Image (cartoon, rainbow, N blue to C red):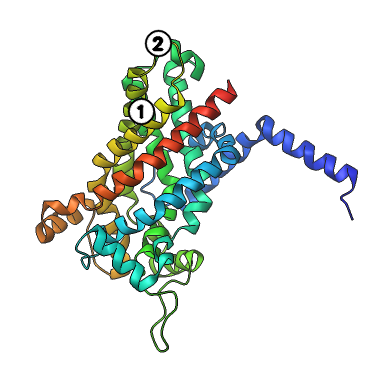
């Protein structure tokens, strides 16, 4: 039986009201509720944060396909990167890839991907929504006006840092679960009598961390993630803006080719800066599982350097750079298309 006409009309009206601004109310409500579930180390005013992301929420339906595609293509590289950073059983990228394939088949490269797939659109909407609204607050110019009156690089850097800081709220628990699952090296088809993996899936992983480590356990490594993303995303957006301006005439929009190249190199530049703290972040996230006590970010840095040398801070840089170019090129192309469609 088909839905009743007045029911369809009601649903249509509800959706239209959401599109006309009620999303701001939902984001502000979430901003008031979320602090009660977070550890006290997160002092940022979430209500303001969520209000500024209301516009970015409209990125979700349009940007999800490209964001999800980029994540699927990049996740195998991310799995290799995480294992190189947190384990000492691999001699390098090729050795890690070969052992993962032989022991776990092709599916081993996609462990921990479900939560990132589910959250990619939300995380990107937070990042780009906060970035755009912060830039609007700093310059009082719309996206189209910024081509004729480009914002200063300082404003771009501040807006990027703000977006990076705020997205940690959304990213930290998902990233922790992803890293824990990526480090499970048990094959999918286990021989009889072999022990089962510690986590049966992302939901079981989240519940287990909550039960064993408490609510703060879901934010393990969040400070390192904050230190990684805050300045790095400032550099990320500055690099993108600089490359676009060098290749585009004043007052004109960059071509799709320019956007792809600028976005790709912005991704590489950001990972060159981010990789040392990315290593520390991953090790802190795994410390709870291994019952290894780090007293904090600095202690983890000192311990890692003493035991494995300074080269440990650049593990995964090569594979990060290879993954960063295509993923960020597509991300920025989607972002520019959406901004132009908004006018």
Residue 88 pos. (x, y %): 20, 65
SS class, disc 2:
loop
In the rendered image, which residue does mark 1 sit on?
Answer: 240
Residue 73 pos. (x, y %): 43, 50
Q: Is residue 142 visible?
A: no
Q: Is residue 219 left or right of residue 142?
A: left
Nearest the eye: 225 or 73: 73
In the rendered image, which residue does mark 2 sit on?
Answer: 250
The crowding category of the residue bearing disc 2, from other C-alpha atoms within 10 Å (few below 14, some 14 to 19, many at least 20), is few
Is the C-beta separation of discs 2 and 1 under 8 Å?
Answer: no
Q: Is residue 145 left or right of residue 78?
A: right
Residue drawn at (79%, 42%) of the image: 11
* Quadrant position of the C terminus in the picture: top right
The crowding category of the residue bearing disc 1, from other C-alpha atoms within 10 Å (few below 14, some 14 to 19, many at least 20), is many
Q: Is residue 10 left or right of residue 119?
A: right
Q: Is residue 251 visible?
A: yes
Residue drawn at (56%, 34%) of the image: 54
Residue 293 pos. (x, y %): 23, 65
Residue 337 got which mark?
none
- Distance, label 2 to label 1, CA atoms, is 16 Å
215, above or below 61, in the image: below
Image-quadrant location for residue 157: top left
Image-quadrant location for residue 89: bottom left
Q: Is residue 193 left or right of residue 11?
A: left
Residue 38 pos. (x, y %): 44, 51
SS class, disc 1:
helix
């Amino acid at each position: 039986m088909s839905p009743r006409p007045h029911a369809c009309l009601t649903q249509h009206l509800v959706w239209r009201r959401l599109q006309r601004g009620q999303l701001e109310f939902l984001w502000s409500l979430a901003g008031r509720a979320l602090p009660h579930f977070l550890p006290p180390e997160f002092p940022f005013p979430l209500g303001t944060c969520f209000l500024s992301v209301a516009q970015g929420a409209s990125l979700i339906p349009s940007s999800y396909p490209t964001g999800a595609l980029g994540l699927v293509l990049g996740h195998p590289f991310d799995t290799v990167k995480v294992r190189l950073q947190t384990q000492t059983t691999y001699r390098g990228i090729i050795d890690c890839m070969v052992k993962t394939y032989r022991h776990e088949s092709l599916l081993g490269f996609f462990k921990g991907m479900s939560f990132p797939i589910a959250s990619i659109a939300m995380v990107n909407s937070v990042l780009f929504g906060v970035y755009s609204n912060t830039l609007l607050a700093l310059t009082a110019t719309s996206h189209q006006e910024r081509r004729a009156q480009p914002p200063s690089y300082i404003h771009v850097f501040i807006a990027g840092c703000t977006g990076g800081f705020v997205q940690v709220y959304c990213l930290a628990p998902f990233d922790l679960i992803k890293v824990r699952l990526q480090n499970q090296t048990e094959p999918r088809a286990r021989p009889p009598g072999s022990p089962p993996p510690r986590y049966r899936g992302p939901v079981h992983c989240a519940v287990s961390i909550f039960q064993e480590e408490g609510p703060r356990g879901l934010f393990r490594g969040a400070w390192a993630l904050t230190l990684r993303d805050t300045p790095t995303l400032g550099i990320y957006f500055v690099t993108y803006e600089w490359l676009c301006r060098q290749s585009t005439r004043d007052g004109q929009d960059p071509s799709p080719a320019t956007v792809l190249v600028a976005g790709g190199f912005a991704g590489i530049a950001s990972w060159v800066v981010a990789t040392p703290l990315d290593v520390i972040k991953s090790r802190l996230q795994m410390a709870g599982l291994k019952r290894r006590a780090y007293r904090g970010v600095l202690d983890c840095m000192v311990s890692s350097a003493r035991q494995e040398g300074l080269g440990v801070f650049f593990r995964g840089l090569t594979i990060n750079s290879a993954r960063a170019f295509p993923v960020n090129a597509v991300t920025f192309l989607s972002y520019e298309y959406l901004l132009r469609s908004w006018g």
